[in-house]
Image: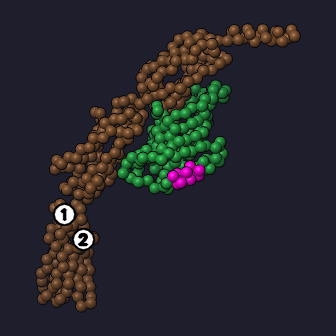
Chain colours: A green, B brown
Amino acid sequence: MLRSLLFLSTALVSALGVGSAQVTVRIERSDLQGPRAMSEQTRAAVIRDYLQSWQSMRGALEQNRPDLLDSSFIGTARDKLAETIGQQAALGIKTNYRDLAHDIQLVFYSPDGLSIELKDKVEYDVEVLDHDKVKTTQHIISLYLIVLTPAEVQWRVRVLQAAAE
Amino acid sequence: MKLRVLLLHCVMAVAMMRPALSQSTNMTLPTPVEAGKAFSISIPGSGKATLYIIGLGQVLKRDVSLGQSAFFPAGSLYNAGRYLAVLAGESSTQSGEFDVSPANKPAELAFLARPSRLPVGQHAGITGAVYVFDAYHNLITAPTPITFELSSPTGTVQKRGVETHDGSAWTSMDSTGQQGMDRFVVRAGDISSNRVISQVPSDPCGLKMTARQSGRQLLLVTDPVRDCNGNAVSDGTIVTFTESFDGGQSTVDVPLKHGVAQVQLASHNGATISVASGIVMGNQIHWKD
């Protein structure tokens, strides 16, 4: 089990190395709530699609383009991020989120298999630009709760919410 | 030399003229703000600056006067999450982080109940999962008491009390022995969400037929077909009659009509006749003219 998790971590780190700074991904061994067992294939797919969502989100917030969210976000998460992008655009602000490290724990797999909840302690840099002038760059470590649901051929983020630790 | 002295004087002058922003203590950020509630950020110093509140859920920008509190009325920040407060003055910038937490009062339940239709008498056959949200669609992460209740038309009620963990909770229930439409309800605080679960009869139980001569034919009729809980198996369910004789075999599939299945087959002395429905075998008859 541990070997497979380590393998998964390595695979994900490698996958995320394309086109961006290397992102460190650690998958915590978790006591998954719910009666449903999760296959390794599902686990890998969920984590892959979740990590990809950070890339989609980064592009969308950096360019103020809500359409870039569509591939990875759905429902509340998409609506809230799109609203943020609308506010950024109205104020002349852009933000650049660079995720550096993820420490992921799967916490809940619903009995019907239609939702998966993760916790992720994310380490990221956020650069704030006002009318293309950099105002600050901050390093943030925050715990996120994420709910993903299956859509067509991938998992999409339905809830993305930072939670006080 | 004169130039260096002049530059030094200039630097000192600029340093003395720097807005209070750089000399002041840091701005005072709120401890977790409840989503939708008013809050303020205390900003010492003097002069003008721009205050940015940056998060994945919302972005705000305000021109502020240093030395005063920046007041944000109720409804300003309603999306839970981590926010970065950036105070940008003419020559310096301060920043800090604070959290907006979900409101504790549940306002919306995302209820996933499965399946919508199942046979009676299935142990843990019905499952329900719920995510609890506040009025701003924030996932309520604080443990929240939840009640799941499955009630059948006959008045049987199964009830489970659980607490959410990281915003979610789940349960499983047995389908009851009686067919009909069950009501599956989840409650949190004073809100609820419900689903209808259709319980249908299970497989036939004690399938039995009788045979009698009808001219040169054999009339085969089942008793009313019921499941093991006594529910009438739905019309349309296929019943298979098989007659084996002298190395030959006839098989006829008949749908249940008004609770019974019947068919006429050619009568063969010494034939063995069996009845089945799906994987359930009924009785056998050895026919003698």
| Front position in the image: B73 or B44 | B44
Give the residue at mark 2: B280
Q: Is residue A152 magenta?
A: no
Asked if disc 2 and disc 1 are in contact, CB closer than 8 Å, the reply is no
Taking B158 as reference, is B272 above or below it? below
Amino acid type, label 1: Cys
Answer with left or right where residue A56 lies relative to residue B17: left
Q: Residues within 10 Å of mark 2 (few under 14, many from 20)?
A: few
Amino acid type, label 2: Val
Taking A161 as reference, is B94 above or below it? above
Q: Is residue A7 magenta?
A: yes
Taking B226 as reference, is B240 above or below it? below
Q: Residues within 10 Å of mark 1 (few under 14, many from 20)?
A: some
Where in the figure is residue A18, as x and y percent of width and height?
A: 65, 48
Q: Do callouts 2 and 1 point to residues on the same chain?
A: yes
Magenta-tinted stretch: A2-11
Helix, strand or loop at disc 2?
A: strand
| Front position in the image: B236 or A137 | A137
Please identify the dominant SS of the magenta region.
Answer: helix
Residue A20 numbered tag = none
Give the residue at mark 1: B228
The part of the image, by quadrant, that contains residue A76 is top left
Number of numbered markers? 2
The part of the image, by quadrant, that contains residue B165 is top left
Where in the figure is residue A78, as x and y percent of width and height?
A: 49, 39
Instruction: Pick whichever of labels 2 and 1 is earlier in the sequence.
Output: 1
Helix, strand or loop at disc 1?
A: loop
| Front position in the image: A90 or B171 | B171
> Which residue is rendered at x = 19% and y = 64% of the image?
B227
> Which residue is rendered at x = 52% and y = 34% of the image?
A142
